[in-house]
Image: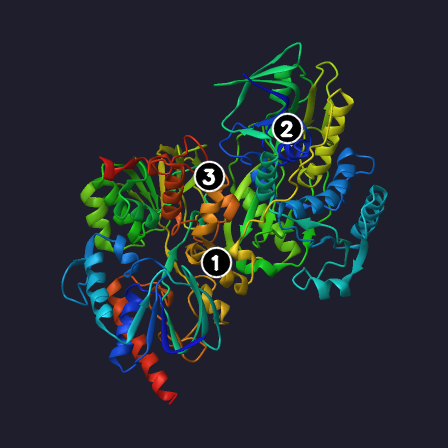
Amino acid sequence: MKSYDVLIVGGGVVGAAILRELSHYKLRIALLEKEEELAFGVSKSNSGIIHPGTQNPAGSLKGRLCVQGNRLTRKITRELGVDFKEVGELIVAFNEDEVKKLLELKKEAETLGVPRIEIVNKTWLRKHEPNLNKDVIAALYAPTAGIVSPYRLVYDNAENACRNGAEIHTLSKVVNIKKTKKGFEVFTASDIFSARYLVNAAGLFADEISKMAGVDDFRIKPRKGEEFLLDKKKENLTNHLIFPLPTKVSKGILIIKTADGNPMIGPTAVDTEDKEDLATSDEGFRKVFSAAKKLVPSINENDIVAYFAGLRPAVGHDFIIRHEDKVPGFVNVAGIQSPGLTSAPAIALMVRNILKRNGLYFRRKFFFHAHRKKTMHLFAIPLEKTKKLIRKNHSYGDVVCRCEMVSSKEIRDAIHRGAKTMDGVKFRTRAQAGRCHGTFCTTRIMKMLAEENGKPLTAVTKKGPGSEIVKKDKTRD
Amino acid sequence: MTERDLIVVGGGPAGIAAAIAAAENGVKDILLLERDQYLGGILNQCIHTGFGIEYFKEVLTGPEYADRFVKKVRSIKEIEVSLKSFVVRLTPDKTLTYLRPGLMQVDKAKAIIMATGCRERTREMIHIPGTRPAGIFSAGLAQKLINIEGLLPGNEVVIVGSGDIGLIMARRFTLEGAKVKAVIEIQKKTRGLVRNVVQCLEDFDIPLYFNHKISRLYGKNRVEAVDIVEVDDDFNEKPGTKSRVTCDTVLISVGLISENELIEMAGVKLDRKTNSPVTNELNKTSIPGLFVCGNSFKVYDIVDSVTRDSIIAGKLAAEYIRSLK
């Protein structure tokens, strides 16, 4: 039986942030993830927005953590070598009534401590956001909004945590939890892990994990969001993140800039019962496009390169982050929907403090490797730099994914750093994510995965066991 | 930066024919760039017959058709072939930048012929609601997996769209022992050649459903089933016509669009639907000396026509280069 001081269940944005935070200290820590790779649950459909803190009720936990998380994300992305772009956001108003609401939002945001927000007028908007609907009369401008790649943040947090001694067990779905005198015994299909403290960051399944641990007082209500990704050619469709006024249940349908360059529009917000319901729909498509066109009329359906649905792990209106006193040592981190990505580093600090208050002794490591070497992406650097890279390492000049310009060097690096599946390669490098959807590069990536992992081609999967790409190798008949 | 007379981008049937024609019309210094590791382009995976009937008056397979041109282009000393060479930038002054293992090179040419081919329209472009499991392939990718790699993508197949590659793959899957359960076409008639409907579907008793579409796709890890539904003339679903078909593979064969991101980067206007250059003259663009041929100019039905028109592109480029002197 493997034993730890702290065991984290769930390898998404939140679990990875907690793992890295705890890896600063002399603790034995590990994370359990049910999928084959991290960020394959809720996090894989995260839109990558680092929110400034607007659109949260004053006094809410998520509002406070969001403002703090926005600040912390800058430091962490610098340390991890993850690109953070401060693009700013605009919440737009079409009439005087909506302008009044903007003023309310502004006041609310100021109470929460969101820095440098202002109302901008039509002239400002024409100049700085020329593709915006001409009927927009004013906007609330929050310059501290930014964008990151949510998956790369998870992978790089996890990689850095492991460098600092943390352990990660994938394909480790928790099936039972036993409370013991010293803490917990956590059962997966093939292993038992013991831990003094247990942190539940299981996203959509946080209610089930909590129930196993002995706290059955909340239900995760998945809220589906469909998103549509546009061609990278349209990178400059907008200069900022564009938001309509928020509704009661969501921030509305947005025009999102992404760290990879492709604009994204969405998401919808529809409650669903099924935690695995990731189906997209015709209604979602119509809804997103009509709402997005209202913000930016030139948006065109022909520019869609991908679409997908994600599920927000909602529980009521706020985050649940607490030590469960009736199960000493058990910490719930549940209901982390938007702004979860932004809040994650602040949540991690909060969890650390909760553990400390409940008896876990924290001693900083003398040597903590805070920095990781930035992962190179050809699409993100100027050609002059590419030229130097190719001279140093020839395989940077061997382009595998043509639509997104990804070299064999980047793909092999991704595999060496832990990519085990086609989606894992895609999330890390963008190979297969472009306009041809992998028609031209799938076979080469399959071969690299098979070769580097020492497996046959028939064992290469899209996203873990059961999702093998091909059924049979006829050359081995 | 190296200066060249002519650069041809793309070593498929169009690029090869254009390069050969340019050399035969007096161009002395030609660079042929191909991003893959061999010449011949997509013909290499088209192991079925039917190529060359017009051009050679013979029935050839894709690789045989390609091989005749590859041998010829290799024998012409005016043509330098550079494989694994991927163009990343093209500017209106006809300067292009390409990457190759170990090298990034910038070349300026008097004339450029773009023969970058086409790509398949994807599931994303026709919007099929449902999940996104493994088992969804473009017809061309399935063709490459089977014919080049020897890998069988699936055992029970539904094909969306009656484009030629889809029809040919219906036969190919059947010959490999898989079961093709249906070919679904939203239009009233096939998009492919009649001979392919007869030889690839009818001869193998594969049902083809016109005025039908997939209304939903199921499966978490791997495709498990699709809902098929009849549509009216406006493509709206007809109530009561839905049925579920179990399958582990969905093949998408809903047409091809020209691949022209490079000339778009150089400022050539593209048609929003076909992605081919907006022009009234064969192979010409709005930039003098920048030519486009083959499937990147417009998507052709048969390769013989690609060869015929690409030869004209080679001649036009030769004329253009002569006119500069």
Residue at mark 3: B132
Chain bearing mark 3 = B
> How far is mark 1 from mark 3, CA to CA?
38 Å
Residue type highlighted by circle 3? Arg
Residues at marks 1 and 2 touching, judged by CB atoms closer than 8 Å: no
Residue at mark 2: A201
Rendering coords of residue A47 (x, y %): 61, 44
Residue type highlighted by circle 2? Ala
Picture quarter containing residue B322? bottom left
Residue type highlighted by circle 1? Lys
For residue B124, the mark is none
Q: Is residue A445 visible?
A: yes
Picture quarter containing residue A25? top right
Q: Which of pointers 1 and 2 lies earlier in the amino acid sequence?
A: 2
Q: How dense is the environment of label 2, judged by Cα within 10 Å: few (below 14), some, or many (20 and up)?
A: many
Examine the rendered structure and indicate whether residue A241 appears above or below residue A270.
below
Residue at mark 1: A392
Residues at marks 1 and 3 touching, judged by CB atoms closer than 8 Å: no
Q: How dense is the environment of label 3, judged by Cα within 10 Å: few (below 14), some, or many (20 and up)?
A: many
Q: Quadrant of the N terminus of chain B?
A: bottom left
Task: Let me know if marks 1 and 2 both belong to one chain.
Answer: yes
Rendering coords of residue A463 (x, y %): 46, 36
Examine the rendered structure and indicate whether residue A188 appears above or below residue B251.
above
Rendering coords of residue B14 (x, y %): 30, 67
Rendering coords of residue A76 (x, y %): 68, 43
